[in-house]
Image (cartoon, helix red, strand yellow):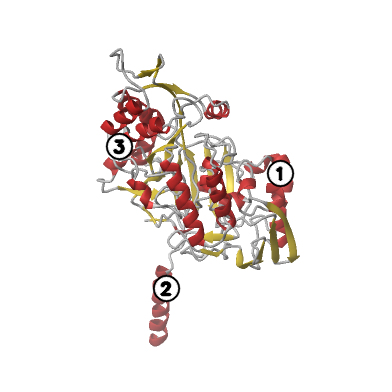
């Protein structure tokens, strides 16, 4: 009897110890979002903000390892690419179910890509991420082919992103235009409730068992995550420090510097791949049609002072059109255009711009050296514009600063009404350069028309060899800077403020989207 009692006690203790080695899911966090998007259906809308919660609701066919840049299995356990680069065959995992019980299979993949490419839904981003997509073929229940009209090297990168994630065909058909309020994926969290502009609630998916190898846990450690919107930058740090939020994206730089010294909070700084924040110089509108004038603006811009003053050195000074963490980035572009204001003045003199009346503004042919600079309200662009205007005034250049909305900026650029205008886009593939510097692109705000560079950009999007692609993108970056088409300001860094009770927070290869399955609270 005594031995039996001792054995029973030992078994209880062993069970307790074993349970302690496998933490049970518990707790909830509040995650602060910084933009209230007009829509959050990833197949339709383009906001980066939507991916912060929805990366945990959906799975993608493949994932990109942010440490190695390699693609790893997601909903597809393996894949093949044809020798001509036109056919991608994916072999899907079995036993996967959407949150509503709908089986995931090849037909579901076909349904999703047909939805994305349907002109009626007017996809703002996902459709273009598929490039020269032709069709999806169902081979059998768990094998599917994506067929392209021509090779498209960025496809694998696209397929790893939430915009091309797999949605439940049953839910899409059930909710129609209201689907964004009732989203259903296969991911580690279930979409529970969404109040636009107010809150979004996710709850743990206890049945999740098919995550990618980049996840560290089989199922989520948290029971619930509530997302709230903090669109005013001034409210973000107070919300974090008061306990209203546990994680907050895009902490203002001055607050980030202070929070780094706190024992209760930390800053998770995540470098963002893609295009740097750059100011486009319109080479088709005088006086910026003169290379010497464009070069003078670059030599006369103290970019390091701008980054230090506005961003408190929390992000790197940009050297060229690609951020330094993007595949294909060429560090040699850092040798272009150091801050040399005297050289800038000399170039303006050589171009015939002189201050003959002593008013501080150069003129030529009776016209002042004045530039129309259009600014938008995001990313500290207005503050950057003020510093640029001050620096350029010392060169004898007058900057007419004007605030506009995004839609107004698009119209101005289309009508060639600007001299200078900033923009940035995020992408983990250097094909993003084609959006800006291909002669027919909508975002070709420098108005460059360079057939040779067009050829490099087209070829780089077709070839699959990474070395060859990197060489082509190096040529593009060199040409952009030689031609003084942009003034790069800074590489984007997402400054996330985190309560120290939150553990295991990591971000995907895009830099914006957290892998919340691995987050726990202590």
x then y, percent, for residue 462: 59, 56
- Please tell me how crowded label 3 is: few (under 14), some (14-19), or many (20+) other residues with Cα within 10 Å: some
Write down the residue under mark 3: 254
Q: Secondary structure at mark 1?
A: helix
In front: 27, or 183? 183
Q: Which mark is residue 175?
A: 1
Residue 144 visible in the current orientation: yes
Report, in whole angstroms, how far the alpha carbon at label 3 lies from the one at label 1.
44 Å
Cβ–Cβ under 8 Å for marks 1 and 2: no
Q: Is residue 252 left or right of residue 159?
A: left
**Where is the N terminus found, in terms of image quarters?**
bottom left
Q: Is residue 494 left or right of residue 142?
A: left
Dot 3 or dot 1: first in sequence order is 1
- Please tell me how crowded label 2 is: few (under 14), some (14-19), or many (20+) other residues with Cα within 10 Å: few
Q: Is residue 439 left or right of residue 68?
A: right
x then y, percent, for residue 159: 59, 56
Write down the residue under mark 2: 18
In front: 244, or 327? 327
Q: Quadrant of residue 22?
A: bottom left
Dot 1 or dot 2: first in sequence order is 2
Report, in whole angstroms, how far the alpha carbon at label 1 lies from the one at label 2.
44 Å
In this picture, is 406 found above or below 140? above
Residue 322 visible in the current orientation: no
Nearer the observer, disc 3 or disc 2?
3
């Amino acid at each position: 009897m005594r031995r039996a009692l001792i054995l029973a006690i030992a078994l209880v203790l062993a069970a307790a110890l074993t349970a302690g080695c496998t933490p049970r899911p518990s707790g909830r966090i509040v995650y602060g979002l910084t933009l209230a998007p007009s829509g959050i259906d990833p197949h339709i809308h383009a906001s980066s903000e939507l991916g912060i919660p929805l990366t945990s609701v959906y799975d993608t066919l493949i994932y990109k390892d942010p440490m190695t840049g390699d693609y790893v299995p997601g909903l597809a356990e393996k894949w093949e690419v044809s020798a001509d680069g036109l056919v991608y065959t994916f072999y899907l995992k079995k036993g996967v179910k959407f949150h509503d019980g709908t089986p995931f299979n090849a037909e579901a993949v076909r349904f999703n890509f047909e939805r994305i490419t349907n002109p009626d839904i007017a996809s703002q981003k996902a459709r273009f991420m598929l490039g020269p997509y032709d069709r999806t073929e169902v081979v059998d229940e768990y094998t599917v082919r994506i067929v392209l009209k021509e090779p498209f090297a960025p496809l694998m990168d696209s397929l790893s992103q939430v915009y091309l994630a797999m949605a439940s065909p049953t839910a899409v058909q059930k909710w129609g235009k209201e689907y964004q309020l009732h989203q259903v994926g296969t991911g580690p969290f279930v979409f529970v409730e969404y109040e636009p502009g107010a809150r979004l609630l996710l709850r743990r998916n206890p049945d999740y068992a098919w995550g990618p190898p980049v996840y560290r846990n089989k199922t989520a450690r948290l029971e619930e995550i509530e997302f709230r919107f903090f669109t005013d930058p001034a409210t973000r740090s107070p919300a974090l420090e008061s306990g209203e939020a546990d994680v907050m994206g895009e902490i203002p730089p001055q607050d980030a510097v202070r929070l780094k010294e706190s024992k209760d909070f930390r800053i998770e700084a995540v470098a963002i791949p893609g295009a740097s924040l750059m100011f486009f110089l319109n080479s088709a509108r005088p006086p910026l049609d003169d290379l010497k004038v464009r070069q003078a603006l670059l030599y006369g811009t103290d970019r390091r002072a701008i980054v230090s003053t506005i961003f408190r050195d929390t992000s790197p000074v940009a050297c060229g059109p690609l951020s330094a963490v993007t595949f294909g980035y060429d560090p040699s572009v850092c040798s272009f255009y150091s801050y040399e204001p005297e050289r800038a003045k000399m170039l303006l003199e050589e171009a015939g711009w002189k201050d003959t009346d002593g008013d501080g503004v150069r003129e030529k042919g009776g016209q002042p050296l004045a530039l129309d600079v259009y600014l938008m309200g995001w990313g500290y662009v207005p503050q950057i514009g003020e510093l640029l205007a001050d620096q350029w005034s010392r060169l004898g250049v007058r900057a007419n600063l004007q605030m506009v909305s995004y839609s107004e900026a698009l119209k101005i650029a289309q009508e060639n009404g600007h001299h200078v205008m900033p923009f940035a886009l995020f992408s983990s593939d250097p094909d993003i350069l084609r959006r800006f510097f291909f002669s027919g692109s909508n975002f070709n705000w420098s108005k460059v028309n360079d057939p040779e560079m067009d050829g490099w950009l087209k070829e780089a999007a077709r070839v699959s060899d990474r070395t060859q692609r990197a060489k082509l993108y190096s040529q593009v970056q060199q040409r952009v800077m030689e031609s003084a088409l942009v003034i790069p300001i800074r590489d984007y860094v997402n400054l996330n403020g985190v309560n120290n009770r939150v553990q295991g927070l990591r971000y995907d290869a895009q830099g914006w989207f957290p892998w919340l399955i691995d987050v726990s609270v202590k």
